[in-house]
Amino acid sequence: MSFDVTTTANDFRCFLAESAVQYAEYLTAEYACEVTQRTVPAPTFRKAAVTGRNDGVAVAHGLTHPAYLRPTLRPDGRATRAEHNLQNAPDVGALILEQPVTDIVPMPLRAVGELDTIGLLGLPVVSVGYGLNWGKSHRAAPSPGLGPMTDLGGGSGVRRIARLGPVEVVKANAFWPRQSVKKGDNTVCFGDSGAPLFLEQEVQVEPVISAVLSGATNWCQGSKDPYYRIDQSPAQQFIQCVVERQDDVAMACQVSVGFTVSGELVAGRFVTV
């Protein structure tokens, strides 16, 4: 697994403009692509498949585990979680990409129940992301700069490889490491949701995804941000369904995942988030 050193909002606007996506002609003025300000080397963006349309506009909304959201919407049309506490919610989803990714070997996932065989308490962990960067002082405001989530006041867009831990609490559905607010940018924050987490054992970071960042606290204080365990049957079944039913996932994988899975997870057009 590797991460581009940086990716900015301008990089993404340039990608949209060069891809000639619908309405790209409106990327003007402050939203225009500034070619001279592109990151070198340029980060790689991959198109997500169109999974629906809203008033004629293509939407790639991703697929959510069917047990995560309530089956009915609020009167105002908003969706709500079936389980308010993210520490208990099946917080896993997927995006379908337009084209298969063949130049990257996907990271392996923990087998079902594997984390129960590991003494997680006290283990240091490493997580990654591209979310907001925060000042290295208690309750500081976001550091300025370009990057994702700029509507919240900043974000450098520089990769984050955060050495968290040790793991303090372990639940059947999730676990969370200690995150000191005094570590500043060496913690996870807004925009890092879905970031993979890796265990560190015997001074080695294991190249196996154990969990993905869910979230709970405000302003990146990090004290209770849970990581959803990827070694659960509901998560593995959902991912396997997406892999096997890539052409009809909305029907097959958003309704029910109570089936028997077989085969192996293979490289394809899906990304866990």
Image: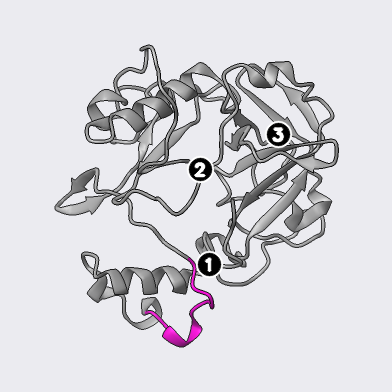
Q: Residue 102, how many percent across, how many down? A: 40, 50
Element at badge 1? Answer: loop
Residue type, mark 2 in image: Pro
**Disc 2 versus disc 1: nearer the observer:** 2
The structure residue drawn at horizontal position 81% and vertical position 45%, both measured from the top left corner, is 180
Q: Amino acid at mark 1?
A: Thr
Q: Is label 3 in a helix, a strand or a loop? A: loop
Name the quadrant containing residue 199: top right
User: Could you say where residue 6 lies in the image, as x and y percent from the top left?
Assistant: 58, 68
Q: Are marks 2 and 3 in contact (CB under 8 Å)?
A: no
Looking at the image, residue 238 sits to the left or right of residue 152; the answer is left
Residue 76: say if magenta. Answer: no
Quarter of the image where one finds residue 271: top left
The relative height of residue 110 versus residue 181 in the rendered view (above or below) is: above
What mark, if any, has residue 7 been given in the picture?
1
CB contact under 8 Å: marks 2 and 1: no
How many numbered discs sit on the rendered protein?
3
Q: Residues within 10 Å of mark 3 (few under 14, many from 20)?
A: some
The residue drawn where x is 80% and y is 60% is: 136
Kindly report which numbered mark, 3 or 1, lies closer to the viewer in this rendering: 1
The answer for how far apart the CA atoms under marks 3 and 1 are is 28 Å
**Chain part drawn in magenta:** 33-43
Question: Magenta span: helix, strand or loop, mainly?
Answer: loop
The residue singled out by tag 3 in the image is 224
Dot 2 corresponds to which residue?
106
User: In the visual, does 111 lie left or right of 44?
Assistant: right
| Image position, residue 131 (x, y; %) | 59, 56
